[in-house]
Amino acid sequence: MPYNKLNVSGAKADILAWVHHDLSLDEQNMLRNVSRLPCLFKHVALMPDAHLGIGSMVGSVVATKEAVIPATVGVDIGCGMAALKTPFKSGILDGRLRELRNAIEDAIPVGFAAHKESDWHASRWPGWDKFEELHEKVQDRQRKAMLQMGTLGGGKLPRAVVTR
């Protein structure tokens, strides 16, 4: 999928965008502010479903150097991210990015899709008691939430093709 370099007035780092919609002034201001973070590593990236968040855009990727900012996904309801260091070096992916991307997309539901069965960890989450109290009038909310834990996103996006 090709990206565009956005021209956001006052930005101090490149903003690479896979979005195909116009960005509001609020979104541009948010991007400008994120591009000025002293811990920003290289550039800001916007995924195709990016939209206004709180502090940063939901659907943005903000890599940092010597800093961890857990809320840079834009404080979207239901969003979660985990970062971990692995022993792998990028060279093992040479020529295999398409294979890896397809394997991830086959294994992890994306968009409005969900798992066929809930994950063992999801069914044992201690927060379900409070969840039921908050959503007592919504039938089947817990079962749906359990099936969606560990999925990627709520936007309907076409399957991307990695060309490198």
Image: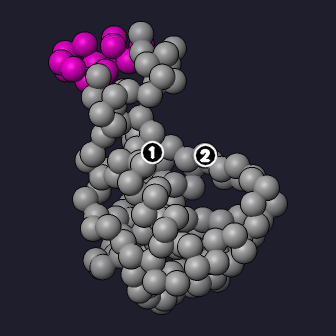
Q: Nearer the viewer, residue 121 or 64?
A: 121
Q: Secondary structure at mark 2?
A: loop
Q: Which residues are magenta?
A: 130-142
Mark 1 crowd level (few <14, some 14–19, many ≥20, 10 Å Cα): some
Occupied quadrant, residue 96 = bottom right
* Residue drawn at 64 percent across, 71 percent down: 93
Residue type for callout 2: Ala
Q: Which mark is residue 82?
A: 2
Tell me the quadrant of the picture where the N terminus can be found.
Answer: bottom left
Q: x, y (%) of residue 25?
A: 37, 74
Q: Is residue 138 magenta?
A: yes
> Horizontal and vertical percent for residue 70?
62, 48
Tell me which amino acid carries mark 1. Cys
Nearest to the eye among marks 2 and 1: give it: 2
Q: Position of residue 82 (x, y in %)?
A: 60, 46
Residue 153 lies left or right of residue 83; in this view the side is left
Residue linked to disc 1: 79
Which is nearer the eye, 7 or 47?
Answer: 47
Give yes or no for residue 159 being in the magenta stretch: no
Q: Secondary structure at mark 1?
A: loop
Q: Give the vertical position of 18 relative to 140 (above or below).
A: below
Side of 18 where 157 appears, left or right: left
Residue at the image position 42 percent from the left and 69 percent from the top? 47
Give the residue drawn at x 68%, y 78%.
42
